[in-house]
Image: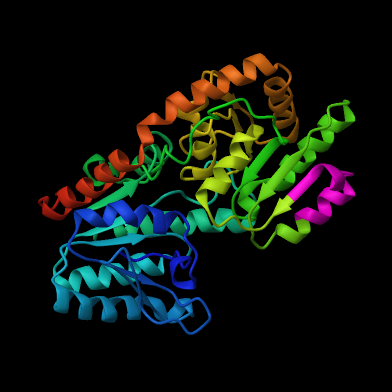
Amino acid sequence: MVSGDRQVVIGERGPFWSMQRHFSTFFDRVDVLVPGPGAEVVTRTIHDNVHFHVGPEGRGALPGWIASRGAELVKEHGHGLVVTHDYGTFYNGRGGARLARAAGLPLVSELHHIPGHPVASGVTERLEKLMARLYVGWARRHVRAFRVVNETEMPALLRSWGVPEDRIVVLPSQYLDFEVFHPPTEEQEPERDVVFVGRMAANKGVDRILDALARCASRGQSYRATFVGKGPERERWIARAARLGLAESTEWIEWIAEPSELAEIYRTSRVCVCASTCEGGPRFTVEAMASGVPVVSTPVGVMTDLLADGEAGRLAGFDVGSLADALTEVLSDETRRAERGLEAARRVQIFEYHAALEGYARGLIALAGAPEAGG
């Protein structure tokens, strides 16, 4: 596997660490190639058979390192499949293709989402979408399949870019431990009205969430909000909250290490909100739903399928007014809100941790043994 997720090598137990706990049981050995985190890190092993190998920090050198280090590992351990998580400048896919070709192995390119799709947050994302289209046009000649994580949005986009149907495989990326993420077992007093969890980056739309909260406040609907995450926009958004008069009603938490603590934050929230312009999942909204919390979200990733009828929350547009109206509608009726939360928990049962990861693992095993697609 070739990944950009460096949380494990710096000692954080994020989603990738949790995923590998069960996923790795279907394989003798999993080797994960990741870029350097900017500090000296030795190869790290988790769950006994998942080995992380840290490459150079500079992106320009990564394709060559992926090909050479990967070849060494294949020669030593006899792997059967190369899987690359692809985004940005697609250094993972470019290096993975070189490795797969040299080793005679099938290649699976994982595209969780495309920046700028369905909506670009700026010029940068429009350029990133163009770069993704160029990559897909090149990679479709080299991959056994593109793995996507939602049923509607990504398959439709790839088909429009000329990818044959038999090279698009849907394997969801939501893996939920329902012993951790579950509705309250007894009545709990909400500590906040709104919760957001995620990387503080432009595509997450936290600025629009803040503007929507300010609009609600101007109508006399003051909501308490908690924002969990770190990233390049965090300080700017904290300052924006202060300018909007929301400093006293917003809480900012940089990192929560334990999933159980995060689940408790969901359970003590009245609604979870996502204002992203592009997503593969998003994961945090599905975690919140499993915890019995309705969701207000833009139509990204799996959210359209889960929320379209309004029974587990509300879909909102990409504008501030639509987001404010959806929040007000969900939060205005506590009985209805609670009913939506229970329906939300019911709908995400399809993402049960063990079953979903077995599906992912067996899907990759099938691709490793599948004949090459024609065309």
Q: Is residue 233 visible?
A: yes
- Residue 296 lies, with reference to residue 179, above or below; the image says above
The secondary structure making up most of the magenta span is helix
Q: Is residue 250 magenta?
A: yes
Q: Quadrant of residue 63?
A: bottom left
Q: Position of residue 230 (x, y in %)?
A: 64, 59
Q: Nearer the viewer, residue 316 or 245?
A: 245
Quick one: which residue is furthest to the bottom in this view?
40
Q: Residue at x 57, y 26 (%)?
A: 186
Q: Quadrant of the N terminus?
A: bottom left
Q: Is residue 143 magenta?
A: no
How many numbered marks are there? 0
Q: Residue at x 66, y 46 (%)?
A: 205
- Residue 308 lies, with reference to residue 264, above or below; the image says above
Q: Position of residue 84 (x, y in %)?
A: 33, 61
Q: Position of residue 94 (x, y in %)?
A: 34, 69
Q: Residue at x 53, y 41 (%)?
A: 118
Left or right of 14, for residue 82: left
Q: Which residues are magenta?
A: 237-251
Left or right of 338, for residue 303: left
Q: Is residue 122 visible?
A: no
